[in-house]
Every structure is written in C-alpha cells, then in structure tokens.
Amino acid sequence: MKKKQDVQEFHDEVVDRVNSAVLCDMDGVIIWDNKLIEGAKGFVEGLITDNVPFLFITNYPSLTPADLSHRLKKAGLDIAPEHFYTSAMATATFLKSQSAGDKVFVVGEGALTHALYEQGFTITDQDPDFVVIGETRSYNFESIEKSIKLIKKGARFIATNPDVSGPSGFPSCGALTAPIEKVTGKKPFYVGKPNPYMMRAALRRIGGHSESTVMIGDNMDTDIIAGIQAGMDTILVLSGVTGIDDLESYPYRPGRIVANVGKIDSL
Ligand SMILES: [Mg+2]
C-alpha cells in the first residue's frame, strides 16, 4: 500500500508540467477576424524569449506559411514562416510517404499545389494516382465531375481537412468532398486535424515528443481530440468556437481550460 507521502509525491509528479514544446492552432487561439486575440502577443513573444520550440498548425490549406506569417504581421505579430504548418503541407508529406505514384489531380488553391510541387508531385488530370480536395472558391460543377470520374477510375480520394465550415461560416473542405463522396460511394482520407498523422508530422518538424509537447486549441472536435489521440497534454482556450457549456456533450476533456492563451501561466 502506498504511504501518504508517496501518494503526495505521485500527485506532484502528475501536476508538474514537463512540456518543452508547443503546437498551437491559429484561428480562435491567436487570431480572430484578422485581429489578435487578447493575450496572444504576450504569449507568443514569451515562447520566443524562452526559446520554446513552437509551431502554429492550421487545417486551412489555402495559405502558405509565408501568407500566414504575413497575415499575423498585419495583425501585429512578427513570426517567421518556418513556425507555420498547414494541412496542405501535411497532405503533401502524407502522399509522398504512400509511394503510390507522383501524379495528383488537385481541387484547391495555389498553396496546396505549391506544397505538392515541393514534394515532387506533378499536377495533372491525366490518370492521376490521387485526387486531392482542399478549399477553393473556384470549386465548381466541372471540378466535382472530374474528381468523380478520376476516383471511379481508381485514383485515391484524399482531402486536406474534415472541417465543414470555416470561422465565418464559409463552406470548408469537408463540405466540398460531400457530393463526390455521395456519387462515388467512397470516403476521403482526411489528413488534417484530428488525424494524428498531422500531429506526428508537426512534432517531427519541431523535434518535439508527444509526452513533452502541449497542444493548444479552441476546437474540441479537431485540436483537443487530435492532441489526446497523439498522446499529448492539451489546453482548451475559450476564445474561439468552444464555449464552456459545450464541454458536456463530449466524452473527453482537455488537460486544462483557460479563457485565452494569455492566461496560460506555465506550459
Ligand atoms: Mg481554431
């Protein structure tokens, strides 16, 4: 039987935070509607001062790291492009790891195409090995029809992220895949959060380990479940899509809950 002192020591061990790296969602955590969220600037600048490895990970596939860096800079936070990791980048890395061919048909923006080019893929509608759906305003009947035909011919159905709508309600990748799914009867493989694939790829990128990295996010369905499934500590911020009353409907909980990132006093 454990003595009282042992129990106390065990308790202390659990409470002590050992996180030395940070993965952090962007929308609803750092920025909202192109404005910095309260406490975000101080929090991120603190990470830089303390030399904590960190990566902003976003399911939004339509901006490159340079675009995202620029977006934050306009809002008042100067962060180098190497601190950003998107579902488009994770998708390109995933396809590469599949070693199933180098031809991809893409429905998405330039950032997704760029990520695929960087991994050596050719973009084509001639017998592609993969059909990749991201988010784009140029999505139309023709792109749906073409995707369906190519998937029926045997191309593998991949999508960047499962979110059905973005921060301001516009349709996201998970909505754009729906008609293709309906007609082909096939479900896409979503690479972005909550797929632990994206979390592991992000961890590798910063040389972090799941047991000593914390995932910070505003979304229970993507960020928090992704962190939990990857075996990481998690912090839910209430500055985005999740309210405190929403928690009741989930069978899991984050490690900690704070109003915003400015309220995180230790990692
Ligand atoms: Mg978010």
Image: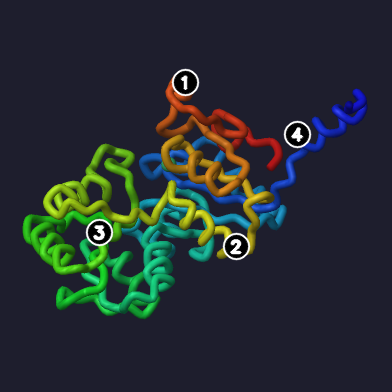
Q: Nearer the viewer, mark 3 or mark 2?
A: 3
- How much space separates mark 3 and mark 2, taking CA atoms? 27 Å
Quadrant in which the N terminus appears: top right
For ligand 1, give the image quadrant: top left
* Residue 40 against residue 48 in the figure, above or below: above
Q: Nearer the viewer, mark 4 or mark 2?
A: 4
- How much space separates mark 1 and mark 2, taking CA atoms? 33 Å
| Residue under numbered circle 2 | 206
- How much space separates mark 4 and mark 1, taking CA atoms? 24 Å
Residue type indicated by callout 3: Ile
**Image disc number at residue 248:** 1
Residue in the image at 85% along x and 28% along y? 7
Give the structural element (helix, strand or loop) at label 2.
helix
Residue in the image at 22% along x and 44% along y? 171
| Residue under numbered circle 4 | 15
- How much space separates mark 4 and mark 3, taking CA atoms? 42 Å
